[in-house]
Image (tube, rainbow, N blue to C red):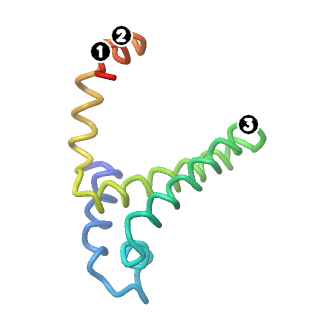
Amino acid sequence: MNTLERLEQTIAARRAASPETSYVAKLNAKGLPKIAQKLGEEATEAVIAAVSGSNEELVGESADLLFHLLVLLDAKGVSLDHVLGELERREGLSGLEEKASRKE
């Protein structure tokens, strides 16, 4: 089991914890819009770190982004395996081909 899979399991377990003792539970208690907002904030911070920060800042913000993405996926009932399956499906396609294959 890799780090992301372990993190996914930890997030799922903490969802039902007390919001007073678990950040994941606290986010979930605030609802999906708050989780999505937090993911957006972390994405923005990662972009800023990429453009004007150090590599260490980018690594930290990227970790925050992945964590919050996993919280959002868990809240929506979407597994990491499902996302990885989609990436595997796209493997070998050029980005332009993949985008063209989507229905608008």
Decide: is 15 above or below 87.
below
Residues at marks 1 and 2 touching, judged by CB atoms closer than 8 Å: yes
Q: Locate the C terminus by quadrant.
A: top left
Identify the residue position indicated by label 2 in the image.
97
Q: Which of the two marks, 1 or 2, is nearer to us in this view?
A: 1
Q: Which of the two marks, 2 or 3, is nearer to us in this view?
A: 2
Identify the residue position indicated by label 1 in the image.
101
**Left-right relation of 20 to 59:** left
**Left-right relation of 63 to 73:** right
The amino acid marked with disc number 1 is: Ser
Q: Residues within 10 Å of mark 3 (few under 14, many from 20)?
A: few
Q: Which mark is residue 51?
A: 3
**Left-right relation of 30 to 104:** right
* Figure quadrant of residue 98: top left
Determine the residue located farthest toward the front in the rendered image: 104
Q: CA distance from mark 1 to mark 3?
A: 31 Å
The amino acid marked with disc number 3 is: Val
Q: CA distance from mark 1 to mark 2?
A: 6 Å
Q: CA distance from mark 2 to mark 3?
A: 28 Å
Q: Residues within 10 Å of mark 1 (few under 14, many from 20)?
A: few
